[in-house]
Amino acid sequence: MTEVPAADRPAPDHPGPGRPPQDPGTGRLPQSTGQPQSTGHPRRWWALFSLVPAVLAIGLDSTVLSVALPTLGVRLHASTDQLLWFMISYTLAFAALMIPGGLVGDRFGRRRTLLGALAVFGAGSVLCATAGSAGAFIAARIVLGVGGAVIMPVCLGALPALFPEEERPKAIATIMATSMLGYPVGPILGGWLLTHVWWGWVFLMNVPMVLAGILAIALFLPESQAKDRRRFDLPGLATSSVGLTLFTYGVTEIGQNGWTDPRSQTFVITGVLVLAAFVVLQRRSGDPLIDLAWFAVRGFSWGAAMSTVVSFVMFGLLFGMPLYFQAVTGQDPQGTGIRLLPVIAGMLVGAPLADRLARSLGPHRGMGLGLLVLAASLGAGSTTTAQSAGWATTFWITGCGLGIGLALPTAMDAALGPLPEESAGVGSALVQALRMVGGSLGAAVLGSVLDAGYRAHLQLTGATATRVTAAQLTAARENVTAGMALARREGSADLAAAVRTAFVHGLDSMLLTSAALAVVCAGLAAAFVPRRAHPAPPR
């Protein structure tokens, strides 16, 4: 039998027709030229820390508004609908422009784009602080959302050009932990500012961080951009932006009005249809905005899926726990922020360990272990009662932060690692968009589980039942905030105790549901996430 010459033999890892070429060990897409993967950029750590002020400003602004809403309602004479738009205008601008923002960074340079986005974010902060009407404030929040939508994906998109394979998880963990730090710190700092100084400082506090970020990025962040300037896929940009906006708005409305609200359902369904049209357009485009071949790569698809699940669980937790601290333990927003700090402490411990676990156990086991720690902590939280000690709550929410810190950076690195450098901004924007959708769904779905458990267990007996009318009971069943307001108005300790007990039952159901989801995903991560953190050496 004649032997086929070696040069004519097919490569053993040839993907076959219709599939992108991948590394056999990691399932990686071909990388473009850039910094050598063995060394990275010589100033990479200075460059990373130059991104910290920008990311922290985004995190703070995500939560500080919730503390300021009552004051803004009075000062700007805002209606209930306008107060809602104070919240969602930022989110919708963020959803609409995240993927275009990543594309702009890839095409025109990530350093240049970040400097412009920070300037826009700083201008939006000043406009919020000086707004004289509700309409002006909503417009200023949209400006803030435009800046934020560009900052986050471009920051993540810059990392593959800066860091070698082995250091990138640490860099991603730093960005993730910095972003999460804003969630509890926002209410703490915002509450202090509202108590002691002019309310506008709640937004002007972003300006020093923006200026520090601009200076640091100008000094330390090297420029990086795609070597091949792709054209703007206008149909893809339009359908992705409109679809994400409609879907996000619909889910937000569901959180306010419930799953049976026809208007909310219409927005969600329309958003899904537009996103489906986006996928069809990308399949037919010769130069698509999103290369759908990315999803054929296990690292990207499973990393994106697991990071979305972690965000789903995390935002459900961040929805339920502030209500627990305020309704059950009687904390104000500032005290609630302080009691959420253990989540960040757990993340700060877990994030540095995530890289070591991924390298020693493999990303699949490291990610699975993080999800199991998260599941165990949520399971411990599901035993909470209205009389649970504060130290017990601190213990299990710290465990949740530890699990998130172990799982999320590894999942993000698995998703971003296979991307070619010239598409790092768009790819990171896509992953961030999926995480945002997962977080919105987590708050809506897990919030519904909490509300259903609350309503099912809100039972009044004895003297309390005879004093509370049917209309009052219906109002109390709306949510725990309405129930506690009614109890205070009636001066009824029995009603307050019943509301707290019912809410904790709902919270426990939500935490148990989240724990079960984390266990399932731990098994999926162990089975399907690529088993090697680094590409095989070239043959």
Image (spheres, grey):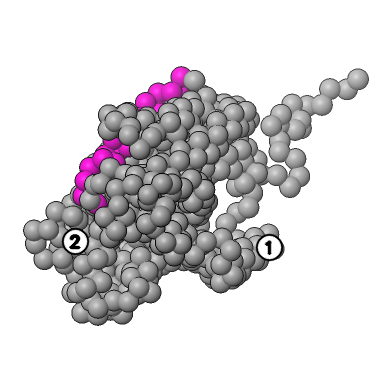
Disc on res. 280: 1
Q: Residue at horizontal 75%, vertical 40%?
A: 16
**Secondary element at image label 1:** helix
Q: Residue at horizontal 24%, vertical 52%?
A: 333
Q: Amino acid at mark 1?
A: Val
Q: Quadrant of residue 260?
A: bottom right
Quarter holding the C terminus is: top right
**Secondary element at image label 2:** helix
From the viewer's side, name the closer residue of 5 and 261: 261
Quarter holding the N terminus is: top right
Residue reaching furthest left? 196
Q: Nearer the viewer, mark 2 or mark 1?
A: 2
* Residue 486 vertical position relative to residue 512 in the rendered view, above or below: below
**What is the C-alpha distance between the residues marked 2 and 1?**
43 Å
Can I make out residue 492 in this image? yes
Q: Which residue is mark 2?
A: 202
Can I make out residue 428 in this image? no
> Where does residue 146 sit, x and y in percent of width and height?
36, 67
What's the magenta region? 333-360
- Circle 1 packing at 10 Å, graded few (<14), some (14-19), many (20+), is few
- The overriding secondary structure of the stretch rendered in magenta is helix
Disc on the earlier residue, 2 or 1: 2
